[in-house]
Amino acid sequence: MKIFVVGDVMLDGELRGRFRENYEGATLCITGQHWRYYPGGAANTAAILRGLGHQVNLFGVVGPDWAAGQLERLLGSIEHRLKALLPITTVKLRAYAEDKLISRVDCEKPIPSDWAVAACYQTGTGEGVPDCVVCSDYAKGVFGRHCQSTLRRIIEWDCPVVVDPGPRDYVDIWDGATVATPNLREAQLMQIGTKHLVVTKSSEGAEVWSGGNCRHISCSPVSDAQIVGAGDAFTAGLAAGLAQGQDIYQAAEFAVKSATDYVSHPRRENYALERD
């Protein structure tokens, strides 16, 4: 299946080491041997879909910096169009000590840009509509009023459009899309006008809302779950199912399984980069 992923691309960094308190004037210090980098946000969703065996096109914006270069290496064989329109690439750095998350540092400067959405639409118009489109929204500038008319054209394509919605004051830009995948908190804060709604509930699985009806889909228990990126895995699984012609309930079941498999294994070891 051919799947387009458009959205906020970022680089995830992870340091695992040991904790030092009040070390050389620092209130908090984690000492490790190397950083490990992973694709994040829309790039993570694209990588998971590629791992599921699908042909993926990724559209996003980055900055003119080292993080963009790391993403280029990480994405490998994934067909991608990333343009340096941001001042800096969004980077999330997490530090762990004794396998516990101790701190997280985000580096970002979001600005509105309609380039990624326009590139997605132009590619679909020129090369043919894909089997599914994923809109991965982390509220970093790719989606908003500035691209609403182009989004409307994509939503009107003859294919499923899956939305992983980000926190914002308005969500009517997604009206008419096939399905949104908010977590429980997001679903309580936002009224999303998609045809279906699949609410993720962490270890409790998910709820599928369709036509006024609700169906709960449970998941298998997971010990020591690696939860970073679980939402991306769920969205990727849902998109993969819909692209293959499954109905919303079958696709949601596959999405729960995809997310469960993802958090059950060491985090994205198959596409990590290390740097001392």
Image (cartoon, grey):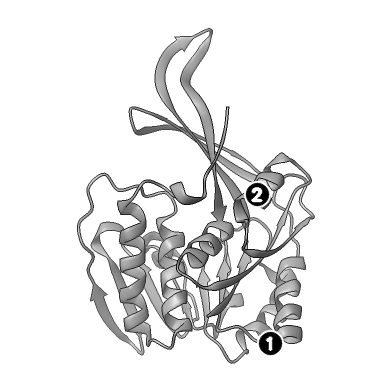
Seen as rendered, the residue at the extreme left is 221
Are there few (<14), some (14-19), or many (20+) residues within 10 Å of tag 1? few
Q: Position of residue 103 (x, y in %)?
A: 46, 31
Closer to the chain start, of discs 1 and 2, is 2
**28 sits to left or right of 42:** left
Q: What amino acid does circle 2 point to?
A: Arg
Residue furthest out toward the top? 24
Q: Residue 274: horizontal and vertical position, in percent?
A: 55, 36
Q: How many labels does the image show?
A: 2
Residue occupied by mark 2? 73
For label 2, the crowd category at 10 Å Cα-Cα, with few meaning under 14, some 14 to 19 and many 20 or more, is few
State the residue at coordinates (32%, 82%): 250
From what the image shows, is residue 138 above or below residue 49? above
What whole-number distance in Å separates the C-alpha atoms at marks 1 and 2? 27 Å
What is the secondary structure assignment of the residue under circle 2? helix
- Single out the mark in the foreground, 1 or 2: 2
Q: Quadrant of residue 262?
A: bottom left
Decide if residue 97 is on the left or right side of residue 147. left
The circle drawn on residue 37 is: none
Residue pictured at 42% horizontal, 49% vertical: 228
Percent position of residue 165, x then y: 52, 66
Please give the residue where the numbered disc 1 appears in the rendered image.
128
Residue 86 vertical position relative to residue 247 in the rendered view, above or below: above
Task: Relative to 6, say whether 251 is above or below.
Answer: below
User: Residue at the location (32% across, 59% down)?
Assistant: 261
Can residue 114 be seen in the rendering of this structure? Answer: no
